[in-house]
Amino acid sequence: MVRFALRLPEDLHARVRAQAAADRRSINSEILHLIEVGLAVIAADAESPGGDSACPAPLRGKPDSPPQAGGAPTPA
């Protein structure tokens, strides 16, 4: 088993903690469950033709970070 530190915003930590309590799991077990469910959805989307256009692309970097090189131009 791999151990690593994970930094979460306080509001996200509170949401995970509340969901873990509702599901009667530890926070660690809840995070593992959510990752497994999320990866299963991604795998299912990859198998379907065209994927699900209703789901936005995953975020990369911090929400307030500038666009990466080669991305869409920023409005002036």
Image (tube, rainbow, N blue to C red):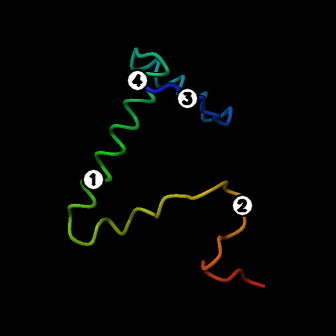
Name the mark on residue 35.
none
Say whether disc 4 or disc 2 marks the residue closer to the N-terminus: 4
At mark 2, the secondary structure is loop
Name the spot of residue 25 as percent of width and height, x first: 41, 16
**Dot 4, crowdedness within 10 Å: few (<14), some or many (≥20)?**
few
At mark 1, the secondary structure is helix
Say whether disc 2 or disc 1 marks the residue closer to the N-terminus: 1
- Say whether marks 3 and 2 touch (CB < 8 Å): no
Residue at image location 47% in from the left, 26% down from the top: 19
Check disc 2 and give the amino acid type: Ser
Say whether disc 1 or disc 4 marks the residue closer to the N-terminus: 4
Q: Which of labels 3 and 2 is toward the front?
A: 3
Residue assigned mark 2: 65
Name the spot of residue 3 as percent of width and height, x first: 51, 25
Residue at image location 57% in from the left, 58% down from the top: 60
- Looking at the image, the residue that sits furthest to the front is 2
Residue assigned mark 3: 4
- Say whether marks 2 and 1 touch (CB < 8 Å): no
Q: Quadrant of residue 51?
A: bottom left
Between the residue at mark 3 and the residue at mark 2, the CA separation in whole angstroms equals 24 Å
Between the residue at mark 2 and the residue at mark 1, the CA separation in whole angstroms equals 28 Å
Image quarter (top left, top right, bottom left or bottom right) of the N terminus: top left
Name the mark on residue 43.
1
Residue 66 in the image: above or below residue 62 = below
At mark 4, the secondary structure is loop
